[in-house]
Amino acid sequence: MSNVSSGNYAPEKQDVLDAAEGRWDDIFQSLAAELLPFQKRPGWHGPCPVHGGEDGFRVFKKTADTHSGGMCQTCGVKADGIALLMWVNKWTFSEALAEVGARLRIKDPYGRYADGDREPLPPKPAVQAKVHKGPSDAWIRESLRKIWKGTVPLTDPAAEPARLYLRSRAILCWDRAGMERSVRFHPALTYKDEKGKLQQHPAIVTLLISPAGEGVTVNRLYLTPKGEKAPLRDCKMMFPIPSDRTLPGAAVITSRASEVIDVAEGLETSLAIETALGLPVWPMVNTYLMEQFVPPAGTKAVRIWADKDRSGGGRKAAEALKVRLWEMGIRAQIKMPPMEIPDGKKSVDWNDVLIALGPLGFMTHEAHRAMR
């Protein structure tokens, strides 16, 4: 880590993203060369730059020319180039902003440039044709409307694949009143494979809601008719986001807000906790959104049910959220699964606890404190 982000230099994120438009090739070349092949071939699947593998990571096609961003099937969504740099380099938000801002010669709100000896990037060409990639906002909004209109509650007879899947995960709370507002089932949702071929599969569809109460997008979990995860490259996929919506801060709101809110990373984890303890838990979808979660007004405390993984990403995201919540005057507590990660596995979560130990697995001293 260089020293450009030390001191008080703190550029605004939007200023940095505006200046970085069309410059991510140069930025990644300078700050995270392992991201460059993906940035040059948006949509291409390759090994995760953090933990390896074969083909679990890609940079988004739609935003490659604007604010970048990508997704690892294991590590989750990284909404923009700043989030990618934080992830790959293990930087804080302010460190990543300062590093990019320094190379783009961005002033902070006080008119200051970064200190340090980092070489700025070459000037952006005076004339640069903008190429729009990806679907239009009108198409995204209409597609989201059609997807949601085509869903039914998990209690509907047609939703048997979803119920079979949840039962296989020892989850029994799918029929709780109010769940249908954010967690639903689509009997035949379209999936486009890497060759552009269209398929249709049953899917659990969850709605992400912004802190302002607006729908942002949907997340999809593709299944087989027998209630198994569909054998697809990406059986869990987030739909594109309209440009007038922002993902950070959003969550899947599975119950009415109260003074104490419980949050977890995945849908299965959240529903497992509710099955065991009767506590409605809001899924954050991934670690990035876990870090960025914004609780509603009136929240006094948040319990964070974190994943335990070998990379430490689940714990780090929970810690980052905890620190931010305390800074907001909201009490926060982290709950870690009381199980070791088995050999050959990358992680354990609270759904694994429910499957292996049943509700009694939640009655350890640490977990039981959640009920007080």
Image (cartoon, grey):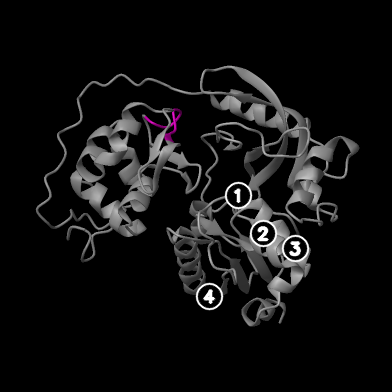
Who is closer to the viewer here, 111 or 260? 260
Between circles 2 and 1, the one closer to the viewer is 2
* Dot 1 or dot 3, earlier in sequence: 1
Q: Amino acid at mark 3?
A: Glu
Mark 3 highlights which residue? Answer: 274
Q: Amino acid at mark 2?
A: Asn
* Dot 4 or dot 3, earlier in sequence: 3
> Which residue is pictured at 65% across the width and 69% down the height?
298
Q: Characterize the magenta stretch by its predominant secondary structure.
A: loop
Q: In this view of the protein, can residue 252 be seen by the observer?
A: no
The quadrant in which residue 281 appears is: bottom right
Quadrant placement of the N terminus: bottom left
Quadrant placement of the C terminus: bottom right
Mark 4 highlights which residue? Answer: 329
Q: Amino acid at mark 4?
A: Gly
Any mark on residue 210, and which? 1
Q: CA distance from mark 1 to mark 3?
A: 22 Å
Residue 159 rendering spot, x and y as whole percentages: 83, 38
